[in-house]
Structures are given as structure tokens and as C-alpha cells.
Amino acid sequence: MRGHVALGLVAALLLSPPAAAAPRTHVVVIDKMKFGSLPADLKAGDTIVWENRDIFRHTATAKDGSFNVDLVAGKKGSTLLRNPGAIAFSCKYHPGMRGVLQVAK
Amino acid sequence: MTAKLCLLAAASLLIGTAAAAGGPTDPQIAHIAYTAGNIDIDAARLALKKSKTPAVREFASEMVRDHEAVNQKALALVKKLHVTPEQNATSEGLTKHAAESRTKLEKLHGKAFDKAYAANEVAYHKTVNGALKTTLIPSADNGELKSLLETGLTLFSEHQKHAEHLSASLK
């Protein structure tokens, strides 16, 4: 009986669909008038924490309007990446600071 | 030991000669950078007092905010490095020129003021960025000062672009 139960459990484990990877949090540092390196393995559902270590106020503003994080010097803010795609963003105060987030499904 | 002392003496002589013969010294650079920042803050405060145009006011607020941040950092740095900013011909020239510009700007109103302020900001940032690139950054001896000046150059280049857009939008 026990053997059956155990077998049943193993079967159930094997048959159940693979669990989706849990959403992750990635940090992007802003310093010296630059966005730091952007995570390469972003997925929809992940969160970006923008950490402004610069002495200036900056924003991370999506070109498509999906997010706009305004950070005074030394502050952090987060963005939930709801949808996949390439999201261009920049600092609205210093538009030369920009990047593109590549978000997979 | 003697060899080390000789090397140190030679190094200090070289540095001393470079400073005397070439560009400004770190205390002079600090004074020039701080003065340049203050001049732009003053001009921005005048714009906030005189202009009612949202784009001009937004630009001026950004100038106050960013230049104050650089100057605070510069003050903290000179304190940390025990450097006393030293007045020099370049910073005196900047101050004199700024006073003349201010006198002209104060007499203007409305659209004429906006245009003159924006044009002045374009020219001013061009001059300061040129000085940073060709003289101040190459002459800076201390690494932290050099790094702050480099960040300043990136920031002021953004300001120059912003001023150019503002100036073009006011025509």
C-alpha cells in the first residue's frame, strides 16, 4: 500500500507541469550620470529596483509610458515589468542617459 | 631609502613644475569649478524671478538643483582633501563676465528675457564644457577631483543640449 502511495506521488510529481520560474528582482544602479549595467535575463513578472547613488535627481522613464520612477539623490524605486518586449527608457532630466530593457515572456 | 627620497623629490619637482608651467593647480581648479556653478545658479534664480514661461522655469529649476548638487559635492571634497580653493585669473574673469551678462538680462522682460537667458545658457555651458575638456580635467591632479569634473562635464553637456532645445523652442 505504502509502495503504491509512493509511486503515486512520484507519478504526480513527474506528470505535473514544471513550475514557472519565480519572479526575480534585479538592481540597476544609477551613478555618475549613467545607468549601470542592465540585467540580460529579464522576464515578464520580474521587478527592477532603480538605485540612485548619484548626487543628482534622476528618473527612469519608459518611452512607452509603462513606468516613470523619479528619484532624488540616494533613493530607490521599483518597477514591475508586466509585459514582455523591448522597453526603451531614459532620464527625463538628462535625456542622454538611456537604455533598453529586453523583457522575455 | 635615499633612493626613495630622491624619487619623491623628483616627483614633487615634476608636479610642481607642471603646475607652474602648464594648467591650473587643484586649488585653482576647485575655485574655477565652484565659481562656474555658482554663476549658473545665480542666473537660474534670476530666471525663476523674472520668467513665467513653464519651459524656462523648468530648465532654471534643473540648473539650480544640479549645480547645487555638484557644488555641495565639490565643497565636501575640498574639505576632505584639505584643499583651500584659490581665486585666480580664470575665476575672476568668469565672475566679471557673469556680472555683465546679469546686468543685461535684468533689463529685459517677457519673451526677450527668455530668449536672452536661453542663448546665454547655451553659450555659457559651451564655454565651461570647453574649459573642462581642454584645461580643467587634464590639469586636475587628484583622482577624486578629476572624477567629479568628468561627471560635471557629462552633466553640463546634458545642460547644453537642454539649453539648445530650449533656445530653439523660443524662436
Image (tube, coloured by chain):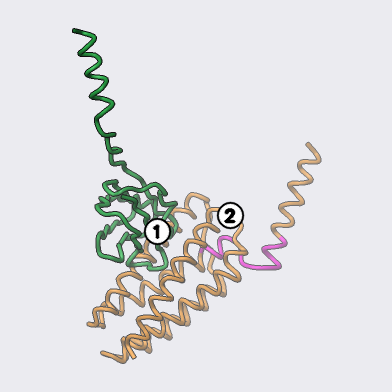
Chain colours: A green, B orange
Chain to which the residue tagged by mark 2 belongs:
B
The amino acid sitting under disc 2 is: Asn
Chain to which the residue tagged by mark 1 belongs:
B
- Where's residue A55, x and y in %? 38, 56
Q: Are marks 2 and 1 in contact (CB under 8 Å)?
A: no
Nearest to the observer: residue A11 or residue B133: A11
Nearest to the observer: residue A41 or residue B58: A41
Identified at 39% across, 59% down, the residue is A100
Q: Which residue is mark 2?
A: B142
Real-space Cα distance between discs 2 and 1?
Answer: 18 Å
- Where's residue A56, x and y in %? 36, 59
Q: Quadrant of the C terminus of chain B?
A: bottom left
Identified at 29% across, 56% down, the residue is A71
Nearest to the observer: residue B40 or residue A17: A17
Q: Quadrant of residue B104?
A: bottom left
Q: Which mark is residue B125?
A: none
Q: Which residue is mark 1?
A: B72
Q: Is residue B29 above or below residue B124?
A: above
The amino acid sitting under disc 1 is: Gln
